[in-house]
Amino acid sequence: MSDHTIRPKSNENGIDVEHQADQAANGSFSHVVINMIGMLIGLGQLSIPYAMETGGWTSIFLLIGLGIIAAYSSLLLGKCLDKNPKLTSYKDIAQHAFGTKGKILTSTLIYMEIFMALVSYTISLHDNLITVLAGTHIKVPWTKLSTSQLLTIIAVLIALPSLWLRDLSSVSFLSSGGVVMSLLIFISVACTAIFGGVKPNHSIPVLRIHNIPGIFGLYIFSYAGHIVFPNIHKAMKDPSRFAKASILSFTLVTALYTALAFMGARLYGPEVNPQITLSMPRHLLLTKIALWATVLTPMTKYALEFAPIAIHLEHKLPVKMSSKLKMIIRGSVGSLLLALILALALSVPYFEYALSFTGSLVSVGICVIFPCAFYSKICWGQISKPVLMLNFTLIAFGSLLGVLGTISSSKLLVKSLQKRVHLA
């Protein structure tokens, strides 16, 4: 989930599709690769070492396999766009394949993913903020909120004004900031392994198959970026190179995730935190950099992730309504949603389970199931039986693991909440 939210280019938003596409079609191959990598790398990387330790080192095959599947499904989206040049967005492809019902279902899942991802980001903000500001004490007499909760509320309030900006280009710089923060996190973890004095001497279990459904959601969430790929495709100077750009991007990201998984699991073993930054030695400067990067990343996401909802909402408002009133309505809705996100994040402070639940319930559909279904429907009769069988197999595979992962993460989340209530 990243800067795709500030670049809507579909008919539903009242934008001239063909003019927009022609105007934006100047992306070079290297620029497209960088954009795709930036889309894929996010806070999901924090949980990769934990997922590997939980599932065993052979679960790395699942990580690599999902990377290959996600790359394949991104190619299918590109082929759907090649079939109809008028299509410009993920929702356009859904409508072309399955009509209005397909568009509604896809839109629902997209908005669900945005909302649930922001809940996970806010949980991460809460966990890392109290660590980076350890020793800070804030107390409000008439509330029962802890210092960590109050700090999180303050951080969210600082980010809140960005939801009221009408010109989305005003917050576009946040996108690149989020990418830089994500890269800083990875570099900090890598440098800790090299220069931080932490020895990678922990052994990793071979396989814990009973944990595979739970970590599936964590892995698939880390490859969530397909919503924006159609926009990247339309922005290419030479769309015929989209397949090569996609393969290269997923290869590099999968290599990065694999290195991070082995590195984190070997460094911290069974004690590895679901957020790798919270396992790093507190006294190191590198740790402080990683923690601050993790804190700032969610704060750059709110306005960007809310943008598609804001655009859709504004498009539904009467044309004659004044821009000031539209801004008030849009900002008020955004503020209410952010308040709900904050309340959920503080009530369910379990990053790994929230992330796994999001990946299993929503991301697998957007990354695997839908692209295969779109391509099979649009190109029915024009593709070979082996390819058709492959697509059906991937749909079944994604559906099965999605259901198992949703059930597994739900049970773990409920158990954690019950334990929390009992201890309280």
Image (cartoon, grey):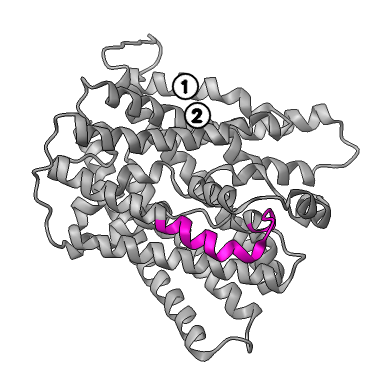
Residue corresponding to mark 2 = 299
Circle 1 Cα neighbour tier, 10 Å, few/some/many (<14 / 14–19 / ≥20): some
Q: Looking at the rendering, which quadrant does residue 108 occupy?
A: bottom right
Q: Is residue 345 left or right of residue 272?
A: right
Which comes sooner in the sequence, label 2 or label 1?
1
- Is 243 covered by the magenta stretch? yes
In magenta, the rendered stretch is: 233-251
Q: Mark 1 and mark 2 in contact (Cβ < 8 Å)? A: yes
Query: Residue 5 location in percent, x, y?
Result: 62, 44
Secondary element under disc 2, as helix, strand or loop, is helix
Q: Residue at x 40, y 28 (%)?
A: 293
Secondary element under disc 1, as helix, strand or loop, is helix
Three-letter code for the amino acid on which mark 2 is drawn: Met
Query: Residue 43 location in percent, x, y?
Result: 40, 41
Q: Residue at x 51, y 90 (%)?
A: 385
Three-letter code for the amino acid on which mark 1 is drawn: Ala
Q: Residue at x 40, y 19 (%)?
A: 151
Query: Residue 184 location in percent, x, y?
Result: 39, 33
Q: Is residue 58 left or right of residue 171?
A: left
Nearest to the observer: residue 142 or residue 279:
279
Residue corresponding to mark 1 = 155
Circle 2 Cα neighbour tier, 10 Å, few/some/many (<14 / 14–19 / ≥20): many
Nearest to the observer: residue 361 or residue 289:
289
Dominant SS of magenta comes to helix
Q: Residue at x 29, y 56 (%)?
A: 215
Label 2, label 1: how many angstroms apart (C-alpha)? 8 Å
Nearest to the observer: residue 189 or residue 112:
189
